[in-house]
Amino acid sequence: MALRNFKLFRGNQNEGTMEHYSVEVDKGMVVLDAIHHIQAEQAGDMALRWNCKAGKCGSCSVEINGKPKLSCMTRMNEYGPEETISVRPLQSFPVMKDLVSDVSWNYEQNKNITPFKPDPLKKGNYIMMQEDIDRVQEFRKCLECYLCQNVCHVLRDQRQKDKFIGPRFMIRLASLEMHPLDTADRIPDVKDTHGSGMCNITRCCTDVCPEHIQITDNGIIPLKERVVDRYYDPLLRLFYKLFRRKSPN
Amino acid sequence: MNITEIKTVEHDVIVLGAGGAGLRAAIECSMQGLSTGLVCKSLLGKAHTVMAEGGVAASLGNADARDHWKVHFRDTMRGGKFLNNWRMAELHAKQAPERVRELEEWGAVFDRTKTGLINQRNFGGHRYPRLAHVGDRTGLEIIRTLQDRGIHQGIEVYMECTGLDLLKDKDRISGMVAMWRETGEFIIFRCKAVILATGGGGKAWKITSNSWEYTGDGYGMAYEAGAELMDMEFTQFHPTGMVWPPSVRGTLVTEGVRGEGGILVNADEERFMFNNISNRFAAETADTEEEAARWLAGDKDARRPPELLTRDVVARAIRKEVQAGRGSPHGGAFLDIATRRNAEDIKRKLPSMYHQFKVLAELDITKDPMEVGPTLHYFMGGIRVDADSQMTRVPGLFACGECAAGVHGANRLGGNSLSDLLVCGKLAGSGAVNYIQAVSTVPELNDEQAKNIIRSATNILNRDTGGNPYLIHEKLQELMQNNVGIVRSDELLGEGIQGLVDLWEEYANVKADGTSQFNPGWHEALSLRNLLVTSEAVARAARMREESRGAHTRLDFEGEQAAWLQYNIVLKKTEDGSMSTEKVLRDEPDAELMRIANLSIEALEAEVLREKDSTG
Ligand SMILES: Cc1cc2nc3c(=O)[nH]c(=O)nc-3n(C[C@H](O)[C@H](O)[C@H](O)COP(=O)(O)OP(=O)(O)OC[C@H]3O[C@@H](n4cnc5c(N)ncnc54)[C@H](O)[C@@H]3O)c2cc1C
Ligand code: SF4
Ligand code: SF4
Ligand code: FES
């Protein structure tokens, strides 16, 4: 047991402060555990989200010392014993209260994506080889924690939510476009409505993904290539080819 | 309070809960043309279903062509110690394959066999590899698929909105009062039918794999509205929860670890499950390590290792080892996959387990054994419904998924929940459609009822002083863990029931600080009533059932008693507000189903083979 210091955001979209709390922390605890103790003993009305406590649901996303993270998978011993741990809600979305932001914009985006449309001829007898779906399964690991949406500078600093659907939904699009049974064509939408051109491949999204999905290299760049292929621009295609990272293992 | 100031929304049907069951039910309703509202406490996609790991059981026969609904049915009945509702278990086994294939049509991407079909894995109590899966994140795949299907179908989703209580027009359902978590504002739903799909109530215990949402809200709401609860004594303790570090005690370790060959050993390095094979399963279980190893290598003539016995058996065996002083350092058993499979395989087949232990316990499961122990996981019992329509005895009130009783009897097999959600979710949806088509008038809302519900919710905030909801909850968890745990006795249960009386009193005076806006303390207080109803129902039913069957173990009444097999225990609210506990005679099972369930496995396999041959 050791006493640890926290600064937690208390307030809403319009006003708020970083409040100081001290709490006894046990061996093996994660940041979410410590916040739960603070909530139960010192701040009963403090809002926060969580569900699974095991990195499976993507509810507990916050910014810890400025880094977007799942609080249930962030161990206290990642920080020095004297370090004060600051926790804020995701900053790219309106703050509802305390550590909870309003992520409903993301749910709206999903509605605008053309749904899965399987080949009717193959119905009842779907054969897919594992190697043909590995990539799609990588994208489908997404927890919808929105950490990537939170760091993408197009959405965060430039506030261009009306122009770009964001990395989470780029890989959702990629998972549909690369699905062996799908027959819908989303490439025009990828370019226009969803704004694939807005992404300039900074890879900040990939860096924060708790599922280690290669969002940029495996998802966004191939989609951009498909757009370029469709709209004939051999030079740009070459550019993406050169820019693509060697696929990490 | 002026009720007209509270927003009222109309739908044909309200589905409460957006896990697999609620989503599947809502899809069915909306596909059949109903205006459908889907209400959930968390964000969409975060329900328990997302955490399911191992897989969904269905006799697709892809990994072993001998599989057939009859064998799945037989396994389910035997796992449930024959207390399952026969008709439900039949519907479940028969319809599961279709429901899984349908998910694929809606975009789900399951792991494949070498020939490109949906792959299936072994799990406890299932005769063949039967669980369709995606690594160890099957629930995520299912919930995303249903979610994506649902939002494109015109279902209206109300998320982070807590259902408080149901409204009735005389006998039948007329709506529900709910509360927006963000603002604390109330909302009234007016509808012809409500489908409850709220999941279980594991949060009444201290060591549990369940999240904050599992406070038994569906049980509490149905009970208050006059519906019956059944089989509540059957609470499943999953044998393998994490035991270390303390902050993650209870977090689930999927049965998939054992399905992939993981073994259980005690501190003396003894593989103790070989000492725990009951007569019922002796003929189908390996009795030497050599045979178990052959089974893992794929020898179809070898019998399954004893680690894959049903959950009740494994949980009790681990408890026994710990009690005898042969436990692991933190009071569990060792679960070892590292010596059974190579690191690459483990990471590919069980990626989230690898990650979970690495981060939360700083342990590499490809090198070292895990420490595991029982954790409260699942409710076999729940709201009593009709098998075909999933309707309760309150007209217009339906229930499906974990919050309903029947499919699993005294013990659920792994993987049978996800299939239950899909099968019964769809049945509840069509049940509601049929019911609504038959009602001619829209039921009337009763303002007084709504006012009472709202008043008792706001009282918690308005009181000047009162008990801390978090502390009351903690006391409840302590009580249930100690008195209504994995082994029970009349004495323990009696004490437990008395303890609950005291907690009811504390609850009557609970106080939440702060305002109504996103206030977890208030939300916690609101869930206490449901936790208490749930706990009381479990404790009372457990005290009445004087035998040990499946997940219900009585120290003072060992073994199954044939006489008890004839009864379900049913609980309901009486006129004076107290809880009645009743032994209700079960229906006579269908003769053909009875025959199938009682056939020897050899005879059933031969029968299935003949059937498959004749149909080509
Ligand atoms: C860690 C873990 C692993 C599991 N693995 C497997 C597995 O491999 N295979 C398997 O078959 N089963 C597994 N299970 C069991 C299975 O996941 C659950 O039984 C199942 O998902 C329950 O689904 P459901 O639709 O009934 O409820 P849930 O998915 O729990 O959904 C309940 C819904 O009800 C809502 N709700 C509850 N109360 C209210 C209220 N008052 N107001 C508004 N909304 C409310 C919640 O918000 C939620 O949306 C696992 C369970 C856990 C915890
Ligand atoms: S790579 Fe693209 S999507 Fe990802 S953070 Fe950068 S700009 Fe945003
Ligand atoms: S892609 Fe990764 S970071 Fe983005 S929402 Fe999904 S899991 Fe989170
Ligand atoms: S609580 Fe589910 S990911 Fe953290």
Image (cartoon, helix red, strand yellow):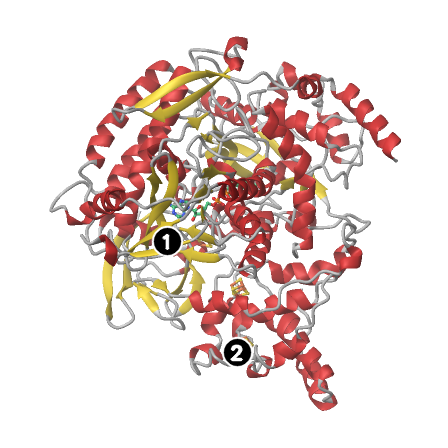
- Splitting the image into 4 quarters, where does residue A17 fall? bottom left
SS label for mark 2: loop
The crowd level at tag 2 (other Cα within 10 Å; few <14, some 14-19, many 20+) is many
Residue B448 percent coordinates (x, y): 23, 43
Residue B472 percent coordinates (x, y): 25, 37
Which one is in front, B94 or B41?
B94
Residue labelled 2 has its Cβ within 8 Å of some atom of ligand 2: yes
Residue B422 as seen in the image, left or right of residue B11: right
- Splitting the image into 4 quarters, where does residue A248 fall? bottom right
Could you tell me which residue is drawn at 62 percent across and 22 percent down? B78
Disc 2 to disc 1, how far (Cα)?
A: 29 Å
Which one is in front, B591 or A205?
B591
Tell me the amino acid under the disc marked 1: Cys
Report the chain holding disc 1: B
| Residue of label 2 | A164
Could you tell me which residue is drawn at 46 percent across and 43 percent down? B440
Residue B333 percent coordinates (x, y): 52, 31
Q: In the image, which is nearer the foreground, mark 2 or mark 1?
A: 1
Is residue B493 visible from the viewing direction of this image?
yes
| Residue of label 1 | B161
Report the chain holding disc 2: A
